[in-house]
Image (spheres, rainbow, N blue to C red):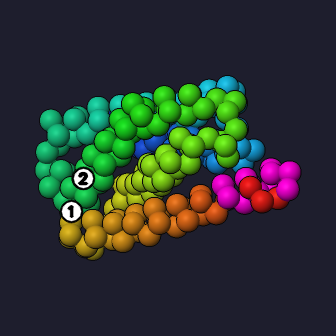
Amino acid sequence: MDLKTILIIGHAIGAVLGVGGATMSDLMFFKSVKNLKISKTEMKFMELGSLQVWAGIALTIISAIGFFIWFPELLKTSRILAKSSIFLIILANGIFLNLWVTPFLKKHIDVNLAESESFRKAQTILVTSGAVSIISWYYVFILGTWRTIPYSYGPVIITYFAILIPGIIVANMVGRYKLRALSKKQSPNGEG
């Protein structure tokens, strides 16, 4: 097996770990919020998903450095430049998730989220960072598998933001609606 194949495999495994971890973390978050409490076990699963994402990020960065060193001609394509730009968004969002979101959620273990003023205030940030993560990982994954993109950097990035921005808006609308509906359902008089 040659070096290029090894780097491609490492890069693909990194993407799979990232997409899988982001998906698992988001699903665990929404499952936790469904009963309006985050248990210690649910938090551990979200942290496991985060660890999986970071393993994916590490493999992706290591393989990308390998490509940069040994195959720099590959880095000049619009697809690779777009993937790299979006990957920087994934990286920045991941840092934010680890430094702010995870500690915030840990403070809310076994807390009734419907009654938590700080959770309601942070809901937009929580849902937005989750939406950025999942949409960005899947978009990069699709770009990585779509070998012959007939578009230049600009249209690929514009398409990304054309998907990301409505995705964030819809995720927040659904998140607000679900939290309100769950709060009313939990309330003894049904008024939330």
Labelled disc at residue 107: none
Total numbered labels:
2
| Three-letter amino acid code at the position of disc 2 | Ser
Coordinates of residue 28 in the picture (x, y in percent): 64, 41
Q: Secondary structure at mark 2?
A: helix
Q: Along the horizontal axis of the image, is 47 left or right of 189?
A: left
For residue 183: magenta?
yes
Identify which residue is drawn at 66% across, 55% down: 179
Residue 141 sits in quarter: bottom left
* 12 to 181, vertically: above or below: above
Residue 184, position in %: x, y?
76, 57
Observer-nearest residue: 76 or 46? Answer: 46
Residue 154 vs residue 72, the one in the foreground? 154
Q: Is residue 21 left or right of residue 58?
A: right
- Regarding residue 140, the answer to whether it shows in the image is yes
Q: Circle 1 sits in a helix, a strand or a loop, which is it?
A: helix
Q: Residue at x 64, y 63 (%)?
A: 177
Is residue 42 found inside the magenta-colored segment of the image?
A: no
Q: Which mark is residue 78?
A: 1
| C-alpha distance separating marks 2 and 1 | 10 Å
Q: Dividing the picture into quarters, in which one does residue 175 lie?
A: bottom right
Side of 52 relative to 86 (left or right)? right
Span of residues in magenta: 179-189
According to the picture, the residue beneath numbered tag 2 turns out to be 85
| Residue 54 at least partly seen | no
Amino acid type assigned to the residue bearing label 1 in the image:
Ser
Residue shown at 21%/66% (left/top)?
A: 153
The residue most toward the right is 188
At 85% from the left and 56% from the top, the residue drawn is 189
Label 2 crowd (10 A; few <14 / some 14-19 / many >=20): some
Residue placed most toward the observer, 45 or 112:
112
